[in-house]
Each structure stands twice: as structure tokens, then as C-alpha cells.
Amino acid sequence: MIPLRKTLLLGILCLPFLTNTHAAEIKPVQARSAFDFVDSMGVCLRIFDDASHDTIVRPRLAELGIKHIRAALKKPGDNHRGNGQIEMDRLKQLGKEGYKITGIWSCWYSMNDLVKISESLLPDALYQVEGPNEPWNGHENFKWEGKKWPEGPALYMEDMHAALRANEKTRKLPILSFSGTTSAYKSIEQWIDFGNEHIYTDNGDSLTEKGHLDKLIARCRATQYPTKPLQFTEAGYCSDPKAFRGTSPEVQASGVPRIYLETFRQGIVRTFIYGFLMTDDPGFSLLQPDGTPKPAFKAVQAMRAILDDGPTQKKTPGTLPFSIESKVSSVHHLLLQKNDGDFYLCIWNDIGSWDPKTKKNRKNADQPVKVSFGKTPAKVVEYLPLTNGTSAVNTREAPDKEITFEVPDHPLILKITP
């Protein structure tokens, strides 16, 4: 039998060892910039030449808060699907209001025309330019230098690069590839600054179910973008169950915020949701045809507002010691930090909520997730943008080092004050 005095001494000597073991298990996690995440959010925009531009589009864009928009560039005098001069004037207006435009180039025009269009939108509006939209899909009956897919798009990007770089005003414009990958050629990196793809899923799947996102990134790396950073200029969910890839407004609302988080988590520089107000594809729009916001609009609006960190990036993000435990591998997380020092831990269960057989919503159970901190935070504030907007659902002052949260299939955001 060990004497009581020795037992107490042994216990005291062991305490630092146990504490250090716990601290060693919870390693510092490098945060990413909240500013960079918000700046990665984009939306596809149709430019209208009628009154809806001022009565619907501009007010709703301001409410949404996203500054990166993707829109087709048109030649003044080209009045196919809208007056070209009016639409370009409206892009200039949006540029002066602080929007950064990714312009899609058309194979209908000569390279000289496209350089002139780009010049006219500089310096305020045009942020970057993109090659032809889905030339593999027969858009615009694509053909360049007599070649269709897959040879034509590569020739197009070579000519596009040469034309832009030869002009003093456009030579520094970032160039995105056409959207689409093909094994017909291994690389076109010498002519682009960013690889470009579109990502959609069938049956309301999340991007990571069935490996959709991993497979797409792997294909990009194996074909024309081995090393270039990637952007996705289209992604989204359709809220009309009767339409192509149709689901429901509820599935769209839970899925679209996850798209932004998941693509950024996996290194995609910018993702554009298709679309804002798309008359050709109203199911994919974030707005109803009359401009009424869908639930997805409100969820994105709230998430962006919670994570917004002002107009410029100032500080390099730090680290936060924490760990996450979940019984399911579909629970993902992303740690962000703002300039004021607060961390924002975004957690979501990345699974779809649509039953393609019954054409009805599927209720996914919230998943218990334990978050363990290396050091007790001063405060933890919980947000659920989809259901509660920007209002906090719970605030914990000086909480425990271990907290279990119920994580839904849409983002839970924890504001953590160290």
C-alpha cells in the first residue's frame, strides 16, 4: 500500500504531464482569411436592357452584397437577346458601383472586337475575362478557325491570349480558360491565368457525395490545368422539381451556401453561383421572376454578412488550437479569421436533402459534433444563416473547453473570441 503523502505527490507530479498531453492532442489549426472567403463568392448575372435592371437587379444585388459577377460581353450593335450598347453601358455602371466583372467572350466576334469591348470596360468594370462558355456543349454552335470541340477551344485561347497581351490596356487582364476539360490535350497553361470548370450534381447530391468535386479537380489537373489555380464559373441547384436537375427551394437553400464553403475549402479561388435572375433557367435563379428572393438568396445573404470583413484584407490570419469529432465523415469544417482577431468556424454536414425517387425533400438528422479547444475561449456565438439570418441562436460566455453542437445539412457558424 502506497502512503497517502506519496500518493498526493505522485498525483501532483502527474498533473503537468496530463495537461501537456491534452494540449499536444489539440494542435493549432491555421485559419484562412474571412476576407478571402467572401471575395471568393460570385454570382452569374444576366444583363437586361429593360427596366428590370434598375427595379430588380441593382437593388437585389446591393442586398445580396456579393461583388463578383459573371456576365457576357456584347458588341454594341449586336442586339441578339438584348441591346448590346445598353447592356455594356450597364456593366460600366455596375463597375462604378464597385462590382468586379468576369466577362465571358463570344466566338461570334473577332479578336479585335473583343479587345475593343474589353478596353471600353476598363478600368472600372472589367476584372477578368473568360473564354467561351461550355464549347463542348454546342453553345453558340462553337467553331474557331474552322475547328469545333475539342481542338477549336484551345486555338481560341491561344488567340485570345495573344490579342490581350499585345494591347497595352488589356495586357494585364487575368485570363480564365473556357469552361470544360478534355483529355484531347494535356495543358493550355501557357495561355491562361486560371483553369475554369462548371460543377453541378444530379439528384440534389452535395458536391462531395460520390466524389463529384474530387473527380472534377483531378480531371482538371490531369488535362489542361496541371498547376494553374482554378475557378468555377458555374455551380448551383435548381429549385424547380420539374426542371432539369430539379430539386426544391429548400434543397437549393441548404446546398448553395455549402457550395461556396466546400469549393473554397478545397482550394477553388472563386465560385460563381448560377444564377442571379436567369430568365432561361428560372429554377436555378436566386430570385423569383418578379425579383422576390428565394430562401437560397436569404441564406447566402446572411452567411456573407456574418463573415464579411470589410473592403480590404489587412492582417495575416493566425491559428486556433481546436479539434472536431464527428461520427460521420460528411461533416466538414472551415476555419476563418477576421482582422479583429475573432475566428469563425463554419461546420456543415455535406449531404444532399432530395429524394429523386419520391421527388420530395429528405429530412437529414442533425449530427452531434464535439469541438474541443486547446484554451477556453472568451466567448462562442452560434449562427444558422439559413434559419435565423444574421441573428445569433446562442451565446456562450467563458464556455467549457469541449462543446457538442448539433450540425445540420446547412452551415453552422461559430464566432469564437479567443
Image (tube, helix red, strand yellow):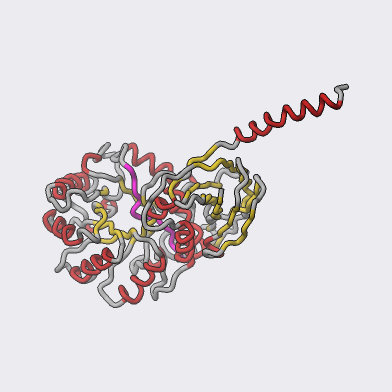
Q: Is residue 21 left or right of residue 93?
A: right
Residue at the (46%, 68%) spot, across then down? 294
Q: Residue 171 at what x, y percent from top left?
A: 17, 49
* Residue 238 within the magenta-colored segment of the rendering: yes
Q: How many marks?
A: 0
For residue 212, say whether it is visible: no
Viewport quadrant of the N terminus: top right
Residue at the (20%, 61%) spot, across then down? 121
Asked which quadrant contains residue 103, the reply is bottom left
Residue at the (18%, 58%) spot, across then down? 118
Q: Residue 256 at what x, y percent from top left?
A: 45, 58
> Along the line of sight, which residue is nearer the eye, 119 or 376?
376
> Along the line of sight, which residue is nearer the eye, 129 or 237?
129
Q: Is residue 360 left or right of residue 93?
A: right
Q: Is residue 76 above or below residue 260?
A: below
Asked which quadrant contains residue 391, the reply is bottom right
Q: Residue 353 at what x, y percent from top left?
A: 54, 57
For residue 224, say whether it is visible: yes
Q: Is residue 37 above or below residue 28?
A: below
> Along the line of sight, which residue is nearer the eye, 235 or 17?
17
Which residue is most to the top? Answer: 1
Q: Which residues are magenta?
A: 229-240
Q: Is residue 216 above or below residue 383?
A: above
Q: Residue 386 at what x, y percent from top left?
A: 53, 62
Residue at the (29%, 42%) spot, across then down? 182
* Residue 263 within the magenta-colored segment of the rendering: no
